[in-house]
């Protein structure tokens, strides 16, 4: 089981230079979990792509459906106190800290491409680009 942030989920479903790493992660461990709010962030990623005319609403809806099916039953609640303490410690957003909190709660590490998270929480994170085919 791997805790992943929304960007990792997006890289898996939306072709980019990071997709190869997300696919390698999936081959190593296909069970991904995330805080429940991953869905809202993912929809925002899709809306951003639509706004930039990089995908149509129909394509975004199809990707949202695929991601929802993939992540069904894999959303988790996080400990509020832990999230806020991590945010205070790191000066990062509570959104970002929810992923680290979940990794700590589950006794694992967060896979991310987010440089700020990797820098602030090196013991709790694994760089996505460390996964290769």
Image (spheres, grey):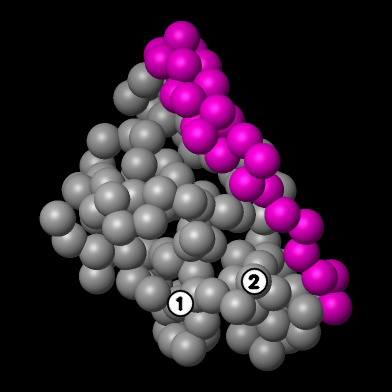
For mark 2, what is the residue?
106
Secondary structure beneath disc 2?
A: helix
Q: How many labels does the image show?
A: 2
Secondary structure beneath disc 1?
A: strand
Residue 36, given in percent of the width and then of the height, sits at 71, 48
**Residue at position x 50%, y 69% in the image:** 110
Q: Image height check: is 96 above or below 63?
A: below
Whether 67 is among the magenta residues is yes
Q: In which quarter of the image is residue 97?
A: bottom right
Compared across the picture, whether 45 is left or right of 97 comes to left
For mark 1, what is the residue?
125
Residue 64, given in percent of the width and then of the height, sits at 52, 26
**Residue at position x 32%, y 64% in the image:** 128
Point out the tag, 1 or 2, that comes first from the N-terminus. Answer: 2
Looking at the rendered structure, which numbered label has been put on residue 50?
none
How would you classify the magenta stretch by its main secondary structure? helix
Marks 1,2: beta carbons within 8 A: no
Compared across the picture, whether 2 is left or right of 99 comes to left
- Please, which residue is most extreme toward the left here? 133
Q: Can residue 112 be seen in this view?
A: yes
**Residue at position x 45%, y 45% in the image:** 9
Residue 42, given in percent of the width and then of the height, sits at 55, 39
Question: Which region is colored magenta?
Answer: 56-81
Q: Quadrant of residue 41?
A: top right
Q: Image height check: is 56 above or below 35?
A: above
Residue 107, given in percent of the width and then of the height, sits at 60, 78
């Amino acid at each position: 089981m791997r805790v992943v942030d929304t960007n990792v989920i997006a890289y898996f479903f939306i072709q980019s230079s990071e997709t190869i790493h997300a696919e390698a992660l999936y081959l190593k461990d296909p069970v991904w979990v995330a805080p429940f709010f991953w869905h809202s962030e993912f929809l925002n990623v899709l809306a951003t792509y639509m706004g930039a005319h990089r995908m149509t609403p129909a394509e975004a809806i199809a990707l949202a459906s695929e991601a929802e099916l993939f992540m069904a039953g894999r959303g988790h609640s996080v400990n509020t106190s832990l999230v806020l303490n991590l945010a205070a410690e790191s000066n990062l957003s509570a959104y970002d800290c929810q992923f680290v909190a979940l990794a700590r709660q589950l006794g694992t590490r967060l896979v991310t491409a987010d440089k700020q998270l990797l820098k602030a929480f090196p013991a709790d994170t694994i760089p996505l680009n460390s996964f290769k085919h």
